[in-house]
Amino acid sequence: MVKKVVTNVGQLVTPRGEQARSGEKMNRISILDDREILLEGGVIREIGKQGAFSRSLPEEVERIDAKGKPVLPGFVDPHTHFVFSGYRAEEFQARLEGKRYEEIAEEGGGIASSVRSNREASFSGLKEEAEGRLRSMVRFGVTSVEGKTGYGLDRETELKQLKVMTELDQETPVDISPTFLGAHSIPEKYANRREEYVDFVTEEVAPLAAERGAEFCDVFCDRGAFTVGESRKVLNRGKKLGLKPKIHADEIEATGGAKLAAEVDAISADHLLKASDEGLNRMKESSVIAVLLPITAFSLKESYARARYMIDHGLSVSLATDLNPGSCFSESIPLLFSLSTLYMEMTVEETITALTLNAAAAIDRADQVGTIESGKQGDFLILDAPNYQHLSYHMGVNLVERVVKRGETIWKKTGPNF
């Protein structure tokens, strides 16, 4: 197999392990100076001191020169809605003028607006738009991403979104984990027939989604969306079909989503802005990962999830962008970093763990990605900065200089033409 070596690594910065870190362990990351990384067949084979491999390997072996800069694992974004057509800038403007998201949704905006756009979109158009967003995410250092359906709420469009993700997973270097989110909202025509829609999702669409590549089953369990009972039915049906449970929980109100996540052994519960202490304690007992989405809270002018409380009480916390056309139109990892460290009281080290190892665990891939260790995929990024702390210190700026996926450079920053 083809060998490569990454030389002149100024700082090798990585958490370690194949399971999510919790509590104070999130702050423990390995920081090694003057290292080299040996890759073979796109997999990390060995890490050694500078010169350990490059001096003994033939000259024709490809070398990636980090030039004394920091090297981190590729970022993992474990909660996105990147497959969509149509924008909702007018809704954002309405929120700037004082309207609440719930009011906009009641007037036919919100998720319903994206559903209309996605149903009208051609497969090729939807795929082209989604691929463009993937390219943007890669520039921010993302090498693995989760994507959700949920902007179809019918058989044809849900499967269309899913097919976009499975094809892009094969055709691009980015690893994509598809999630079936048929229970994202109640479509207008089922407004007075909720039980019928839940049956439609669980009995008609979920089996097809499982057959066609979905890995997870998600549900929006909250006020104005699905009740705990409805959500339980969706997630348990998904489990029987081999779909691992995830849950949008307690974003708008503490309706019991966090407790349900623990009950069904969900891999993650996401949002959690209003999660109760009891719900969070049950998540801890069941090792449910808390995926927090601070850019969404920022966009909606809501209070942030209690990251400091969760970590101090022993939970595993991950972070994600929640890229979507409505409540959070952003794939910005730099913004995510700033909000996490400045407003959610997370350390830089905890934030790195949350965006790498814990994020990989939130999509059940921590045995493959999320750290720079022997046996893991060669997914990493080189920062254009003197040290990793600049990820928070140099606020809102993309510091990624090069992105490597399975040992291959998939993006590299070029400087200005002067």
Image (tube, rainbow, N blue to C red):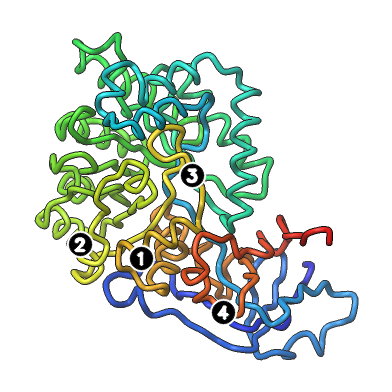
Q: Residue at the left extreme?
A: 278
Q: Which mark lies nearer to you, 4 or 1? A: 1
The local secondary structure at tag 4 comes to loop
Height in image: 22 above or below 98?
A: below
The residue where tag 2 is placed is: 284
Who comes first in sequence, dot 4 or dot 1? 1
Residue 330 marker: 3
Nearest the camera: 62 or 66?
Answer: 66
Q: CA distance from mark 3 to mark 1?
A: 18 Å
Position of residue 193 measured from the top left corner of the image (x, y, whole percent): 20, 11
Residue found 59% across the figure and 60% down from its top:
398
Q: Residue at x 71, y 55 (%)?
A: 410
What residue sits right under mark 4 in the picture?
387
Contact, mark 2 vs mark 4 (Cβ under 8 Å): no
| Residue 44 to residue 220: above or below | below
* Callout 2 amino acid: Lys
Q: For marks 4 and 1, give the CA distance.
A: 19 Å
Within 10 Å of disc 3 (Cα), the crowding (few <14, some 14-19, many 20+) is many
Residue matched to label 1: 342
Point out the tag, 3 or 1, that comes first from the N-terminus.
Answer: 3
